[in-house]
Image (spheres, helix red, strand yellow):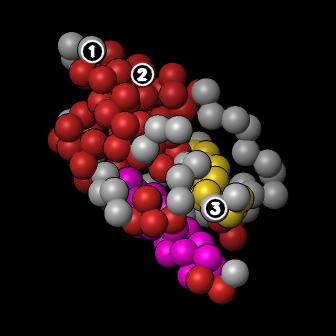
Amino acid sequence: MMTIKETQNKIIEKFSDLTNWDEKYSLLIKMGRELPELPAEIKTDKYKLSGCQSQVWMNAKYENGKVIIVGDSDAMIVKGLVAILIKAYSGFSPTEILSTPPNFLKEIGIDRHLSPTRKNGLGAMLKQIQLFAIAFKALEKNI
């Protein structure tokens, strides 16, 4: 199994093959379209993130020592951001998630090509993933 860093490096490679931001946005949108359909019971206010201009829903479960993250958005680019974060962090242990910062986003250059409100939303998504990992790490200690 790959590490988070290896997974993030694969994402960096995908984006570095593209020469301009129109192509990178297209890849981001394509990744969002590839997200599995989010169950209706998760597309509720309970799972909706605050701090995002668009509607974003995220949830996670703890399975076999791994954090499994699901999410969606009503905006195509934001849905792509959800997808890239799920690809980077879902399926790894809470400890791995908490010990691997999202430096890959800077390497891709996404942080320089988002509006301030989208940057805030991306920060809210990253914070939520960290909160999932913290909660499940606490659960591990009690098992």
Q: Which residue is the site of mark 2?
A: 27
Q: Residues within 10 Å of mark 1 (few under 14, many from 20)?
A: few
Q: Would residue 48 appear left or right of 18 to someone viewing this image?
A: right
> Could you tell me the amino acid type at mark 2?
Leu
* C-beta proximity under 8 Å, tags 2 and 1: yes
Q: Which residues are magenta?
A: 121-140
Label 3: state its secondary structure.
Answer: loop
Quadrant of the rendered image containing residue 7: top left
Q: Is residue 134 above or below residue 92?
A: below
First of labels 2, 1 by sequence position: 1
Disc 3 from disc 2: Cα separation = 31 Å
Name which residue lies at 37% across and 28% down.
10
Label 2: state its secondary structure.
Answer: helix
Residue 52 at least partly seen? no
> Could you tell me the amino acid type at mark 1?
Leu
First of labels 3, 2 by sequence position: 2
Q: Which residue is the site of mark 3?
A: 65
